[in-house]
Image (spheres, grey):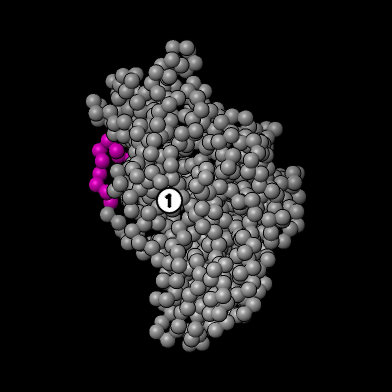
Amino acid sequence: MEKRIQDLLDRMTLNEKLREMHGVRGMHGLTPITYSLRVFGTRANKRLNIPRFVFVDGPRGVVVNRSTCFPANTGRGATWDPELERRVGRAMGIEAKKNGANSCGAVCINLLRHPGWGRAQETYGADPHHMAVMGSALVAGLAENVMPVLKHFACNSIELSRFRVNVNIGESALRELYLPHYKSCLDAGAAVVMTAYNKVNGSYCSENHHLIKDILKGEWGFDGFTISDFFLGCRSTARSICAGLDIEMPQGFYYLPFRIKKALKQGKITIAMIDDAVRRILRMKMRFGFFNPSPVNEPREDHIKLALEVARKSIVLLKNEENILPLQRKKIRKLAVIGKLAKKANLGSYGSVEVHPPSTVTPLEGIKKLAGPDMQVAYAPGGSLGRAKALKIAREADAVIIVTGLEGGDEGEYFPLICGGDRSRMELHPDKEQFIKDIAAVNKNCAVVVMGGSAVCMQNWIDGTKAVLMAWYPGMEGGTAIAEILFGECVPSGRLPLTIPLSTDQIPKLDTKTNEVTYDHWHDYRYFDRFGLEPLFPFGHGLGYTTYALSDLSLELKGEDQSETVTVSVTLTNTGGTAGEETVQVYTACENPKQERRKARELKAFQKVHLERGEKKRINLIIKKSDCAYYNEEKGCWEHDSSPYLFYVGHSSRNLPLMGKLQLRKK
């Protein structure tokens, strides 16, 4: 393949090479209304039969035409099910290819540093290991048909100041928390990396030599190519080319041929840099077979049914007092469904991630379908105009389902005067909170379904309710999945991919207007653990309709040198009355570390396990010894602590009943 690439390079003119390095006809990407009208790409080279690079966005589905809309990424992160995510990736890859694309930007793996980030719904959650496992699964599925694109590299987690903010970050925090999941996804087969808008340590990501040349293409040996985020993602010609940015998207400006030729003439860049960029682009086109295109793979499964399966497993049961859920059809003759979101297919934010599915199911439609002929379902939208009706049907009902939360315009990609942006408060609007309390006051059998792309603080109203479901943005089949959970047609198995605080005041303020921000090691459950704070619901939390017990922990170090692994073995027992799925989680920390951050518990392994009633299974979780290392900034290398490592096993970051100790570094 390398010989073929070199032969093409030798035959290409300079103009032909430069046309590989910028997008064309991409101005429709400027507005949220026109973004999904068609794909984005570079020009084809007809003389040498070199195919175009053609990009379509994600991540909750293919953003063009009528495509399957899966749950938003935080919901898919809540499944903790990498095999399911791989199937989602395969489905997206098939649909992307059918729409003429040969790459898909569905793999958004920016770490959720603060739950108020507007684009939280586009990423899997707040932990790098969890992100690595889920993102790698999506990459593997996409790669069966198209080139997976990772975004946004790196440290992108403020929306309103994304075009100018400078992220100041130390090398240890960068490498331990904000980069490792990118390396995992590259190892899984990602072909393209999209740079972020923001600066890191004073340099725009598209011009950041340390990120692109030193780490991505140097230390990690990435042999694919890089592209800019759209429009303001590229800020220069020579600096970006020298740093290793290979393609400006979606339209050429700084990478137009006359600008690059000028930089060549001035000696700011070299032909070798141009050839390196083009070689990388050609390599991926050949590796993925685009010079000899194959037919689109036929779907191995119904994508709409897959969207339903994902939605079922994404929903997190946060609270269930007196086992009010699942609803008992024999005991409920009148059911009140309240809230305007019950009658809406709430799919998430707009703009570059908006998917237009062929059909949708609202929660109200799903509930009515499963309620059965003997149950009367009454609906009221609530709000200021419908408050009286809502209170009336709530008083008369045997149980109440409130559907509330956030909508696409409340958060997400920011478009001035239109929609989106970061959230300064994690609570619902005060009017919504008061409405929940008013309904719960007139009917004690009240369950709340919360929608949104990130954490929603519930302290002001949760005590008055019996049950709470976190449904995220559940996709085109979300209404069916919510109803199935409510009525017990399937059991809830989702687990939180982030921490839900008691209130906004419990976490650091998200300054959305700042030009400077510092990222450290402390966010989400690491922050709560370090400062001894009690969240409303911890990272990894989730209930089911049964209970589980863990026992008989054992640890074993196997292998030699770099291939060493730790096998964590534990017995999981279903101690309840019905079948279910539990996610066993392993966290590590150092017993007597030299540095404060090594005391912090960190997720290092997890496994989702199905158990029938009363069933018992022995679970083996494998942790690479290298994944327990820390980055020594002074030496510029990875090391293991000389103290023993503690291995905690449990059900969430705060529910860890088992602990074992193991020495990883030879004395």
Query: Looking at the picture, does residue 255 appear above or below residue 89?
Result: above
Q: Mark 1 — residue? A: 354
- Give percent across and percent down for residue 446: 58, 76
- Give percent across and percent down for residue 167: 63, 37
- For the point 66% across and 47% down, the residue is 510
Any part of residue 124 in sight = no
Looking at the image, residue 469 sits to the left or right of residue 347; the answer is right
- For the point 46% across and 79% down, the residue is 377
Residue 296 colored in magenta in the image = yes
- For the point 31% across and 58% down, the residue is 300
- Mark 1 crowd level (few <14, some 14–19, many ≥20, 10 Å Cα): many
- For the point 43% across and 50% down, the residue is 354
Give 315 or 191, whichever is nearer the viewer: 315
- Count of numbered marks: 1
Amino acid type, label 1: Glu
Tell me the chief SS of the magenta region. loop
Q: Secondary structure at mark 1?
A: loop
Which portion, as a residue range, is magenta? 288-297
Looking at the image, residue 145 sits to the left or right of residue 231; the answer is left
Give 443 or 632, whichever is nearer the viewer: 443
- Quarter of the figure that contains the N terminus: top left
- Give percent across and percent down for residue 290: 29, 38
Any part of residue 526 in sight = yes
Residue 71 colored in magenta in the image = no
Query: Looking at the picture, does residue 583 appear above or below residue 150?
Result: below
- Quarter of the figure that contains the C terminus: top right
- Give percent across and percent down for residue 104: 39, 44
